[in-house]
Image (cartoon, rainbow, N blue to C red):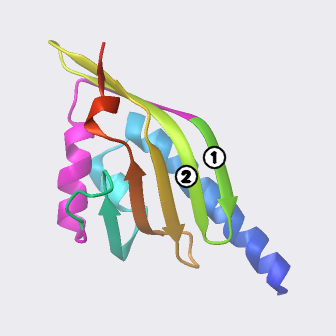
Amino acid sequence: MTVEQDQTELSSKIDATVSAYIDLLTTGTAEQIADLFAADATVEDPIGADIRDTREQLVEFYGIITGMDEHVATLNWKKIAGDTAVFEFTLVTGTADMRFEITPIDIMVFDADGKISSMRAVWEPSDLTQL
């Protein structure tokens, strides 16, 4: 396989993983989202927060979102280059009492299998809007 074919294959894997990530934020479980990550992956959400680097920490983190009464993610745009994807999405979450919206930009680096090896989310608390 040529370098160009390898890159095209990786880009396809990255594209599929980003799509699955957005879909699973809406319809999946924390475990399914964690399955998108490599075994040694790191998550820094938001940038500056403590880094999560175990599967248990990822399941706990994403369990907050998937445990909400409402959790709907919509992809706004994405760019893929090399082993990296940058994308913006809107996430609406809520319980019976409150609803929130946030539009973070995620920076993900992927391994050769298309698994997320690192994720950094760009947002700050003031970006979280109560609906």
In the rendered image, the vertical position of residue 84 relative to residue 49, given as above or below: below
Q: Position of residue 61 (x, y in %)?
A: 22, 51
Q: Quadrant of the N terminus?
A: bottom right
Magenta segment: 53-75
Tell me the distance, in whole angstroms, between the alpha carbons under discs 2 and 1: 9 Å
- Residue 5 left/right relative to 16: right
Tell me, yes or no, whether the two marked residues, 2 and 1, touch with CB atoms within 8 Å.
Answer: yes
Q: Kindly identify the amino acid type of the residue bearing the numbered disc 1.
A: Lys
Say the numbered circle drawn on residue 78.
Answer: 1
Front disc: 2 or 1: 1
Tell me the residue at 48%/42% (across/down): 22
Say whether disc 2 or disc 1 marks the residue closer to the N-terminus. Answer: 2
- Report which residue position mark 2 lands on: 18
Instruction: Tell me the quarter of the picture where residue 56 sits.
Output: bottom left
Disc 1 element: strand
Q: Is residue 72 visible?
A: no
* Foreground pick, 50 / 96: 50
Q: Kindly identify the amino acid type of the residue bearing the numbered disc 2.
A: Val
- Residue 84 left/right relative to 97: right
